[in-house]
Image (cartoon, rainbow, N blue to C red):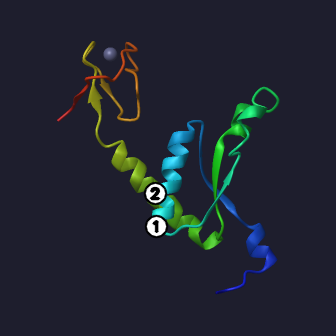
Amino acid sequence: MRIYSAGEVCSVRMVYTNSNRFIVANAKNILESYGVRLVVRNEFASGAIGEVSPFDTWLQLWVVRDADYDRACRILESAISDRNAVPWKCNHCAEENDESFEFCWNCGSGAVGRDLVS
Ligand SMILES: [Zn+2]
């Protein structure tokens, strides 16, 4: 096993963050399945909301090794673009919505029973 210098250990970079902790947890699972080593920050920071800016409490994924950063970005890009590739059509107003939306952007109806756009 390779021993990393202190400089490399200090160069961890944030690869992903989102206000939705479930999405971040999902991204973490995807990256770890590809063997990317990660550090999670703000895992227990939700109690601090109100004292710091909301962004500072978002769950953050940092790559341990700088060399994994570009690969991790590509993995997430393809995973997220795959997920967003299937829009849905609102049952109420027939507007098309991005797959990641839980509510119609146009009328606010929920995505329950939504029709996938073919
Ligand atoms: Zn709608």
Q: Are marks 1 and 2 in contact (CB under 8 Å)?
A: yes
Neighbours of disc 1 within 10 Å: few (<14), some (14-19), many (20+): few
Q: Amino acid at mark 1?
A: Tyr
Query: How many marks do you count on the picture?
Result: 2
Residue nearer the viewer, 41 or 82: 41
Distance, label 1 to label 2, CA atoms, is 7 Å
Residue 52, position as x, y percentages in the image: 80, 33
Residue 76, position as x, y percentages in the image: 47, 55
Q: Quadrant of the C terminus?
A: top left
SS class, disc 1: loop
Which residue appears at 68% of the width and 60% of the height?
13
- Please indicate whether residue 69 sits to the left or right of residue 50 in the image: left
For residue 34, the mark is 1
- Please indicate whether residue 79 sits to the left or right of residue 70 in the image: left
SS class, disc 2: helix
Residue 99, position as x, y percentages in the image: 35, 35
Which residue appears at 50% of the width and 51% of the height?
27
Which residue appears at 54% of the width and 67% of the height?
36
For residue 51, the mark is none
Neighbours of disc 2 within 10 Å: few (<14), some (14-19), many (20+): some
Which residue does the numbered mark 2 point to in the structure image?
Answer: 30
Residue 71, position as x, y percentages in the image: 51, 67
Q: Can you tell which quarter of the image residue 57 is in?
A: top right
Q: Can you tell which quarter of the image residue 4 is in?
A: bottom right
Q: Quadrant of ligand 1?
A: top left
Q: Amino acid at mark 2?
A: Ile
Residue nearer the viewer, 37 or 104: 37
